[in-house]
């Protein structure tokens, strides 16, 4: 495990992640050097190649020789488009390092900030690669001085983002900001296959002057030969990203709330391949031949064919049919995969993205918190009624593969409603239902999802029980934004121990007395029980909560869900 690196490549849309992945695959001898950068090998689906964007996170495992030792690098190429941000969040659970790519001309963009936040929330260490440096030389005709200033300002922007997000993280031992001197920043051009970093300049004797000269004289092939991008980036990965033995003792307490003194916790922290099997599923994909494939991180134990494992939240056991590693679009079957790796298995029919799979029953991992909620809804109907059962089955499969999609059947109209992160997200899903499943579907116009929220404290409202013997008094008021954010980020929930929840609410700004009376949290709404010494309240509380949840799901103004009250 000391020689394993699990990494994700993440960035704003079109900053060059998949082109960079091509270079790394070519450097590892897995695709031809000539087509690298144009082949986009990690965009394995037809619609990704057609649209020229990554839609699904794709995994690949490769080896790289660094300081005379062979390292195994498990890489996940993630999408950059905001509609597919859920894939990035899930990928971050499986990796220990994130290579953040930034376009030298555009600099740090909104999605750069989002992917950094997703990485740091999962305790994943970032490094930076500034791509498209060739554009500064050829398009913007910048001199060495201007170019240096621009690159330094990009690094400063990224560091500012990292500093702001990491200041509340007590479990990071060292400073995670990136710097040229430490070798945690690389520069280059993924399209023209060259790259440099401080250690590589010292090794090859190249400096920015030589690079500008070769770039201006169109000697890009010579540039690629003298300082190939794949070597620079893979060296950086081996040197600066933590291996599972370093990373798991820090990451496990962050994502798992089980007993820290148990043998199970010890097995995960030591990356013990002989311990109990603990496997966290981060992705579900469909293979026409093999069925459902669950991909994820093996935290302890060794996965082998024929094992019978528990899946959190379901009864009984599932038997593993096959174990493998992903190589882009191909899946290589292997005998076994030990702890510290990213594996893909078939046979876990009950698993969904976010399931904990283990050889003994255990506290499951924290659920993967997606930052964004669905914002757009479309109705989907089958053209012919014969296809309806197949459509319902496909929609259930879609919801299983992509937890950021919500599927519901509107009981009043009988429509199937599909909600997602944006129009492109829904367009891709419906196109795949048509092409892959062969079901002709009609989709309605997209509707934007709204939310309702009280603007000020209400008066006291009285409600009576049917026998007129009991009276309830309720008020509603808007909640402080910090508390809403804490709920959305998963820092406060009803699943937490009460003491922990109280402390988290007080940290977010709720006063001590109120935090002790929290009765229920529904979406981002909190019910506070301010009653004193009433007998038999517990027996009616369930009914009060039911009524409240119904009212909050169907707001008073426009029948949209209520938030922040």
Image: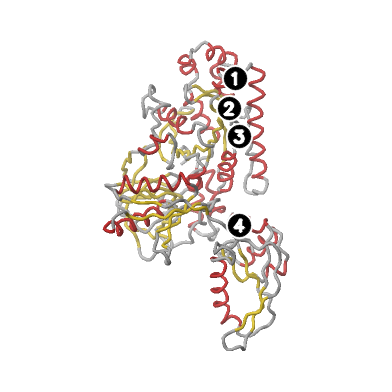
Please tell me whether mark 1 sits on a helix, a strand or a loop.
loop
Quadrant of the rendered structure where residue 563 is?
bottom right
Disc nearest the viewer among 4 and 1: 1
What residue is shown at x 57% (from left), y 81% (from top)?
A: 540
**Residue 125 appears at what percent x and percent y?**
57, 40
Q: Residues within 10 Å of mark 2 (few under 14, many from 20)?
A: many
Residue 491 numbered mark, or none:
4
Please tell me whether mark 2 sits on a helix, a strand or a loop.
loop
Q: Earlier in the sequence, mark 1 or mark 2?
A: 2
Vertical position of residue 62 compared to residue 169: above or below? above
Q: Nearer the viewer, residue 214 or 204?
A: 214
Q: Residues within 10 Å of mark 3 (few under 14, many from 20)?
A: many
Disc nearest the viewer among 3 and 4: 3
What residue is shown at x 45% (from left), y 38% (from top)?
A: 77
Q: Residues within 10 Å of mark 4 (few under 14, many from 20)?
A: some
What residue is shown at x 43% (from left), y 34% (from top)?
A: 52
Q: Which residue is mark 1?
A: 140
Quadrant of the rendered structure where residue 505 is?
bottom right
**Residue 113 appears at what percent x and percent y?**
60, 41
Q: Nearer the viewer, residue 237 or 428?
A: 428
Q: Earlier in the sequence, mark 4 or mark 1?
A: 1
Residue 108 numbered mark, or none:
3
Measure the C-alpha gap from mark 2 to mark 3.
9 Å
Tell whether label 3 touches label 2 (CB within 8 Å): no
**Residue 164 appears at what percent x and percent y?**
67, 43
**Residue 293 appears at what percent x and percent y?**
35, 49
Q: Earlier in the sequence, mark 3 or mark 1?
A: 3
Q: Which residue is mark 2?
A: 104
């Amino acid at each position: 495990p000391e020689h394993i690196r699990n990494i994700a490549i993440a960035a704003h849309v079109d900053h060059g992640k998949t082109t960079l992945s091509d270079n790394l695959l070519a450097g590892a001898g897995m695709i031809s050097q000539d087509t690298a950068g144009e082949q986009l090998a990690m965009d394995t689906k037809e619609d990704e190649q057609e649209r020229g964007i990554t839609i699904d996170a794709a995994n690949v495992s490769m080896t790289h020789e660094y300081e005379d030792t062979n390292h195994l690098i498990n890489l996940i190429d993630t999408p950059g488009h905001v509609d597919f941000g859920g894939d990035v969040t899930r990928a971050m659970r499986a990796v220990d390092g994130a290579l953040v790519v930034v376009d030298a001309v555009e600099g740090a963009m909104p999605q750069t900030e989002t992917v950094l936040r997703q990485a740091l929330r999962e305790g994943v260490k970032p490094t930076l690669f500034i791509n498209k440096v060739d554009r500064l030389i050829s398009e913007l005709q910048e001199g060495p001085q201007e170019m240096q200033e621009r690159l330094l300002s990009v690094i400063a922007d990224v560091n500012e983002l990292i500093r702001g997000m990491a200041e509340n993280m007590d479990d990071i031992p060292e400073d995670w900001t990136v710097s040229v001197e430490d070798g945690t920043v690389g520069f280059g051009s993924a399209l023209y296959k060259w790259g440099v970093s401080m250690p590589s300049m010292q090794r090859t004797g190249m400096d920015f002057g030589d690079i500008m000269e070769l770039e201006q004289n169109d000697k890009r092939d010579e540039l690629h030969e003298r300082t190939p991008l794949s070597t620079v980036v893979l060296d950086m990965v081996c040197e600066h990203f933590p291996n599972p033995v370093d990373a798991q003792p820090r990451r496990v307490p962050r994502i798992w709330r089980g007993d820290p003194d148990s043998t199970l916790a010890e097995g995960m922290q030591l990356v013990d391949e002989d311990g109990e099997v603990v496997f966290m599923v981060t992705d579900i994909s469909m293979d026409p031949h093999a069925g459902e494939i669950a991909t994820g991180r093996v935290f302890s134990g060794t996965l082998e064919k024929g094992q019978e494992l528990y899946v959190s939240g379901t009864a009984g056991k599932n038997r593993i049919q096959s174990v493998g590693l992903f190589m882009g679009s191909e899946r290589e079957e292997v005998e076994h995969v030990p702890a510290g790796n990213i594996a893909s298995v078939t046979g876990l029919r009950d698993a969904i993205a976010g399931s904990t799979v283990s050889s003994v029953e255990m506290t499951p991992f924290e659920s993967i918190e997606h930052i964004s909620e669905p914002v757009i809804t479309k109705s989907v109907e089958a053209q012919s009624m014969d296809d309806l059962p197949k459509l319902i089955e496909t929609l259930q499969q879609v919801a299983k593969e992509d937890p950021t999609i919500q599927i519901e059947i509107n009981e009043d109209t009988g429509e199937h409603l599909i909600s997602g992160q944006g129009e492109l997200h829904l367009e891709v899903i419906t196109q795949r239902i048509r092409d892959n499943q062969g079901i002709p579907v009609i989709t309605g116009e997209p509707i934007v999802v709204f939310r309702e929220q009280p603007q000020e404290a209400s008066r006291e409202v009285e409600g009576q029980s049917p026998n007129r013997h009991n009276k309830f008094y309720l008020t509603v008021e808007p909640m402080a934004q910090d508390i809403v954010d804490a709920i959305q980020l998963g820092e406060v929930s009803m699943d937490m121990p009460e003491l922990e929840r109280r402390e988290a609410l007080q940290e977010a700004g709720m006063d001590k007395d109120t935090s002790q009376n929290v009765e229920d949290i529904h979406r981002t709404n909190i019910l506070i029980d301010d009653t004193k010494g009433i007998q038999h309240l517990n027996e009616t509380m369930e009914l009060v909560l039911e009524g409240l949840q119904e009212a909050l799901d169907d707001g008073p103004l426009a029948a949209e869900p209520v938030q922040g009250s």
